[in-house]
Amino acid sequence: MLDARTPEPRAAGAPAQSWRARGAWQLADIDYAGADRGRAADDTTLFQMITMASFVETGSDLYAHNLVSYFDDDEVVAGWLAESWEHEEVQHGAALRAYVERVWPDFDWQRTYDRFFDEYRQTCTVPELEPARALELAARCVVEMGTATLYGAMGAYADEPVLKDLTAHIYADEVRHYKHFYRYFRRYQERERHGRWRVARTMTRRLLQTADDDGRIAFRHLWQATRRGNGTSVDDEYRAFRDRISSVARRFAPRDLPVEMFLRPLRLPPVAARGARSCAGTLFRWWLEA
Ligand SMILES: [Fe+2]
Ligand SMILES: [Fe+2]
């Protein structure tokens, strides 16, 4: 069921407003009623991916406030974080939830989410903020690169048109978030002037932290609520799920753009860029399959 925070989806067949023209989109722009359940409902991997993403995005305001207060004396950055970024991340969770509730109406999203969040809030690994603002902004570029990659892969994997539309909206948001963080990174880097190695180390560390196993918590609660699959234990099922996700990522994730996004804050001279591209590509492939 949609809760009070969730706007009513528009009716099937009603014209979509141009979210690009308005620079932002809302749940009412997504044609949930037009979702073709027959092209999605039997896909367990899709159900698990979308539901787990909805849990983590819905819970993102747990740590979003830390970042807002880290920039509290910078009106431009703190204003964008509080008024756009945080709102949009939470909207991603609500939008994915609305899709789950439309296509898998028997699944009790709220009850399972509550159980997940009870555990997640106590155990989720929130990376420490970096000691300098330019470094934290470079690390945020990595996080947005990662989410853009995952939604790009989901959209390419999905066969159902409304889900393709929804993941395209979220993908565009994540790329736009990256651009904002990159622009603010450049501003702070002009003042702080960190060396390339320090920026690269910071970004690599954050990339490795995003591969941490927080997804296991979401998966366990999902598994307990649905008992989908044929495995004998949650650990067997989780291993099988990770294998399926790796093969989706190998086949459907964008390749070149994430590597370019990772390297951009390093601002390498052309002569160094080719070797760095190859190293970043190796690191990125490892991350995709971690
Ligand atoms: Fe997001
Ligand atoms: Fe984002």
Image (cartoon, rainbow, N blue to C red):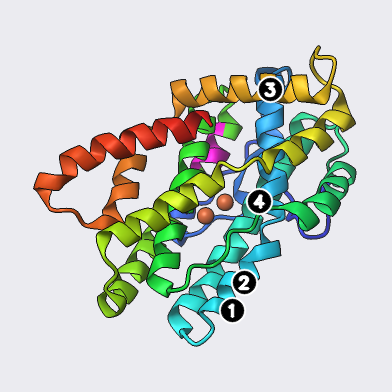
Task: Determine the residue located farthest toward the top in the rendered image.
Answer: 230
- Report whether the residue tagged 4 is closer than 8 Å to ligand 1: yes
Q: Position of residue 220 (x, y in %)?
A: 80, 34
Q: Position of residue 43 (x, y in %)?
A: 69, 19
How far separated are the C-alphas under marks 1 and 4?
20 Å
Q: Is residue 265 found inside the magenta-colored segment of the image?
A: no
How far separated are the C-alphas under marks 1 and 3?
38 Å
Q: Nearer the viewer, residue 170 or 150?
A: 150
What amino acid does circle 1 point to? Answer: Ser
Q: Is residue 166 found inside the magenta-colored segment of the image?
A: yes
Q: Name the residue under label 3.
A: 239
Return the disc, 1 or 4, that comes first in the chain's sequence. 4
How far separated are the C-alphas under marks 2 and 1?
5 Å
Return the disc, 3 or 4, that comes first in the chain's sequence. 4
Return the disc, 2 or 3, that comes first in the chain's sequence. 2
For the residues carrying marks 1 and 4, which lies nearer the camera in this image? 1
Q: Name the residue under label 1.
A: 69
